[in-house]
Amino acid sequence: LNEFGWAVVDNFLGEYVVRECAKEMDKLFNNGLFTEGRLKGNIYDKRVRSDIIFCDNGVNDRAAEALKIRVVVQVLDSMIPFFRDLVEGKEIRSRSEAMLAIYPGEGTHYKTHVDNPNDNGRLITCIYYCNPNWDVKEHGGALRLFPETSECAVDVDPQANRLVYFWSDGRNPHAVQPVWRRPRFAVTIW
């Protein structure tokens, strides 16, 4: 993280957890918990962002069956002490609600943006992918990073059981490339 501004961990929690998280996200979607992703100021503009999201605070009764997703979030929480030493001049005091994101396909995307453009408290973005048998050539959906440490963009495939983390500020503008043919699932915390 300190050298490149981003990092990838493969085989993070196991195939069983990935499959169950994908099922849970699908069930939450079918229960009507997801809404259109919005931009700053609660603006909806599908030309910029066309995912659907559900933010889970861990105690929402309507999402009580999301047990594996909550386990993933707890594991990510347990990593916070390791990140504290990396954050210079800032203090990690808490994390956001977990944002569950689905890109349904049909070209859904998120144009280039920064998670913390105005010092909103987000320090590190952590994304866990729940996409069994994902083929980026067929399904698209790569996370495209534009890290300040590189002269060119870096594409990260949203492979099942992959954890990606990166600095949330202007050091890592990023986008989600268009998704095709099937839904793309991710769990994100900041």
Image (cartoon, grey):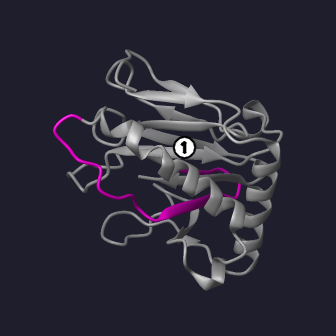
Residue 171 lies, in percent from the top left, at: 30, 32
Q: Quadrant of residue 159?
A: top right
Residue 156 lies, in percent from the top left, at: 59, 30
Q: Is residue 113 visible?
A: no
| Residue hosting label 1 | 176
The residue positioned farthest toward the left in the image shown: 89
Query: Which residue occupies 64% across, 41% down?
Result: 141
Query: Which residue occupies 70% across, 58% down?
Result: 104
Query: Which residue occupies 59% across, 59% down?
Result: 101
160 on left or right of 43: right
Q: Is residue 143 magenta?
A: no
174 on left or right of 160: left
Q: Is residue 107 magenta?
A: yes
Q: Quadrant of residue 44?
A: bottom left
Q: Main secondary structure of the magenta part?
A: loop
Q: Element type at marker 1?
A: strand
Q: Which of the two residues, 182 or 130, is positioned nearer the viewer here? A: 130
Residue 33 lies, in percent from the top left, at: 63, 78
The residue positioned farthest toward the top in the image shown: 151
Q: Is residue 101 visible?
A: yes
Q: Which residues are magenta?
A: 88-110
Residue 178 lies, in percent from the top left, at: 62, 44
Crowding around mark 1 (Cα neighbors within 10 Å: few <14, some 14 to 19, many 20+) is many
Query: Which residue occupies 44% across, 66% down?
Result: 38
